[in-house]
Amino acid sequence: MISRSWNLQLLTTWEKVCSPDFISQWQSVIDKSPDAHVFFHPVLVNLWLKTYRPLRDIKPLFVHATCGEQQVIFPLVLWKRNWKNGFMRVIVPAGHSDFDYHDPIFMHTPTHEEIQSFYCELKEVLDNSIYYDQIFFDGLHKAYVPVFMKVMHREGCLSSSLQDAPIKEHLVLPAQKSQARSVLRRLKRLQEKGKVTFCRYDFTKIDAARSSFEVMLPMHMKRWPNAYKAPGFHRNLLDFGLESGLLDFVEMSFQGKPIAWQISFLFKNRYSLYMPTVDEAYYKFSAGYLMKGYALGEAKKDGFTISDHLRGAEGYKDSWGGDITYIFDVQFDSNRISSKARRWVFNVLARIKSIRVRNKSIRYQQAID
């Protein structure tokens, strides 16, 4: 199964990773790949690096491998974590924690043998040239899970076809009929109270998009207060995404006031819904469903055939129907004595942090009882 011979190049300097020649090769592979996802597009990876290089101690470990006519691009980084994390040296995909999928990009649809032989060659190269404590790949679809790595977490991702999705009132409605009727009733109620409008921003409207985004971001942070947002990441995402045409930014307004937003990715035939936000005062009008329905309706008009709700098992996604596929987070631990010691320190610190958080929650609950 692992007899295939790979020529694997590991790019370990920022100069090589950012060189025009490599970017051109990378772009060629992703353009030709029938299975590529948007999250390893050079634009998105580079904006992630632009954000995180000043914030974290990361070193590039970008992989470019060839085997006959097959080519693979797999952008990885070595993350040297701080004392709070036991000084662990962890190999993770570029985009780790911010982006949903991290399957390697194969130029041609790979066989199981090709995938596993690629991983075996990669591990051998890493073992011989990189000092690491742990390899952690998040967001791998089942076909791309390395057999030698331990599955740590599984999560469902919902996607549905836009080809047969009916449009009513300029909206693609939830697949559940009762939910669809409810959304239309609430749209009518809102329209009876005032004017409802939608706006799609592109790079020609970048200043207006930035202004709208600054209204949106505090509401998103309020809705998900524990979600880490690296300083500048989402602003970089807006600028680079709109300029490259990979990002869709849609706003819903009521009486001229923005009340809901949807940030999505545009890539090949797939419309990937990434970051929804709703003013909580308009929950009762199903503003989130209206916003998503309009964004999907515009995507359908533009010729996209798949809506991808990405990772996360939030209940509201189920209303749209479709198929669930699973992605996996996998881990491999180095057997070095020093690596075992660092992981032990990391686990102790994690337990202490967990106890502190639990005790804080108990004290808060006692205070309000």
Image (cartoon, rainbow, N blue to C red):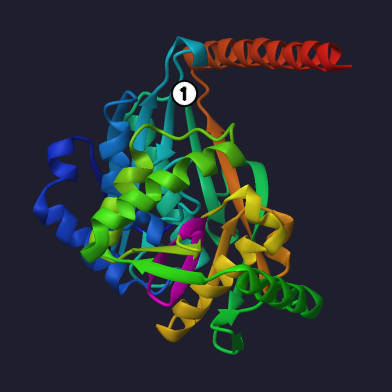
Q: Which element is circle 1 on?
A: loop
Considering only vertical position in the picture, is 343 above or below 292?
A: above
Side (left or right) of 301 relative to 246: right
- In the image, is residue 266 part of the stretch drawn in magenta? yes
Give me the residue at 30% from left, 36% from top. 51
Rendered-image quadrant of the C terminus:
top right
Q: Which residues are magenta?
A: 257-275
Residue 187 is situated, as x and y percent measured from the top left of the image, at 65, 73
Q: Position of residue 28 (x, y in %)?
A: 22, 67
Q: Residues within 10 Å of mark 1 (few under 14, many from 20)?
A: many
Which residue lies most toward the front here? 193
Pick whichever, 191 or 339, lies toward us: 191
Q: Inspect this view and state whether residue 337 appears.
A: no
Residue depicted at 26% across the width and 46% down the height: 46
Instruction: Give the dominant element type of the magenta stretch: helix, strand or loop.
Output: strand
Give yes or no for residue 185 being in the magenta stretch.
no
Look at 23% across and 60% down and name the residue there. Answer: 243
Q: Which residue position is annotated with label 1? A: 133
Work out whether 314 lies above or below 18.
Answer: below
Q: Is residue 244 left or right of residue 164?
A: left
Q: Nearer the viewer, residue 171 or 185?
A: 185
Going by the numbered disc 1, the residue's amino acid type is: Asp
Residue lying at the far right of the rendered structure: 369
Q: Is residue 139 visible?
A: yes
| Foreground pick, 95 / 63 | 95
**Residue 365 sits in which quadrant?**
top right
Instruction: Relative to 190, say whether 63 is above or below.
Output: above
> 87 and 227: which one is in front?
227
The x, y position of residue 74, in whole percent, is 35, 51
- 29 relative to 265 in the view: left or right: left
Above or below residue 83? Residue 114 is below
